[in-house]
Image: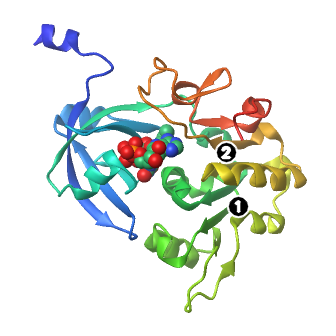
Amino acid sequence: MKEKESKKTIYVPDIAKITRIEEVTPTEKLFNIVFEEPKKQEEFSFKPGQFVELTVFGVGEAPFSITSNPNNKEYFQLCIRNIGNVSGALHRMKEGSKVGIRGPFGNGYFPYEKMKNHNVLIIAGGLGLAPLMSLIRYILDSRDDYKEIMIIYGAVNPASILYKEDIGEWCKRDDIRVCLTVDNPDDKWTGEIGVCTNLIPRVDFPPEDTKVVVCGPPVMYKYVVQELEKKEFAPEDVYLSLERRMECGVGKCNHCHIGNKLSCVDGPVFSLWEIKNLKEAI
Ligand SMILES: Cc1cc2nc3c(=O)[nH]c(=O)nc-3n(C[C@H](O)[C@H](O)[C@H](O)COP(=O)(O)OP(=O)(O)OC[C@H]3O[C@@H](n4cnc5c(N)ncnc54)[C@H](O)[C@@H]3O)c2cc1C
């Protein structure tokens, strides 16, 4: 046994089981996952913004952000868009199927400790809400540790809005402000229309007492940062999750470099201060 353990490398995944699959939009499903080895499940801990490398055996491996609350020790959850080989194979899997998991990876995470006793502004675009869910769930567990919370979320259309149930619950609370917008409304949509950047001018949090987190498609970052700069948020108080084409997840293959940084080990969450002079970053 000892010999077997000593041969285990960072490239060997642990076997885990998909215990629940929920279709949340026409293109995204949530997967609850539990390690086969109970001790591994017990010991698995992560920080909001970290990711795992998931293997679909016989197909391939891809990184996915963890969306569940770090306080949840029963399972962890991923939100996966059906886009290609690995994600497509996952979407065809059934509850009970086995996958391989490496991680959690990423040294840059959403700094929930630094956010304590400050206002928190969360800006999500599309699938970018998924990694932020882990942070939002964690913060709401210890709501009193944080000042005001505002969530700005932009989706392409009403059908593509993720986590509708959670958003419905947040909207009922008086201790979180939720601003939802869609690019392309349908006949029933009565809310905001346009990109999430349009809602930033309405933010009235004092910059010196606010931490900002951002996650969305690459095209969004430049415009969000421009709006945040107009509001005079300091670059060291703005955190962005930068996903890049990643392979190993552990800083060996160099696929995910952003200037002199590697998204997998230096990120995927960076402060704007760290990356603002890297032209490939945003
Ligand atoms: C840190 C991190 C966290 C991620 N979290 C999530 C998540 O929570 N949910 C989720 O659905 N996806 C997430 N992704 C993306 C995911 O890892 C895969 O890239 C995606 O699922 C496509 O893989 P595939 O094998 O299904 O598609 P493939 O068969 O590899 O490719 C399908 C198409 O997408 C393009 N493509 C694939 N990956 C990328 C990329 N990274 N950048 C640009 N183009 C690409 C390919 O060129 C191809 O055109 C994350 C990526 C990173 C780096």
Vertical relation: 209 (above or below) 126? above
Vertical relation: 26 (above or below) 250? below
Quarter of the image with the N terminus in it: top left
Specify few, some or many for label 2: CA neighbours under 10 Å numbering under 14, 14-19, or 20 or more.
many
**Residue 148 has which mark?**
1
Coloring applied to the structure: rainbow
Mark 1 or mark 2: which comes first in sequence? 2
**Residue 115 has which mark?**
2
Q: Is residue 109 visible?
A: yes
- At a point 69% along the width and 78% down the height, the residue shown is 193
> Position of 257 compared to 246: left or right?
right
- At a point 68% along the width and 24% down the height, the residue shown is 259
Mark 1 element type: loop
Give the amino acid at mark 2.
Met
Residue 50, image x, y percentages: 48, 38
- At a point 26% along the width and 61% down the height, the residue shown is 21
- At a point 64% along the width and 48% down the height, the residue shown is 218
Q: Quadrant of ligand 1?
A: top left
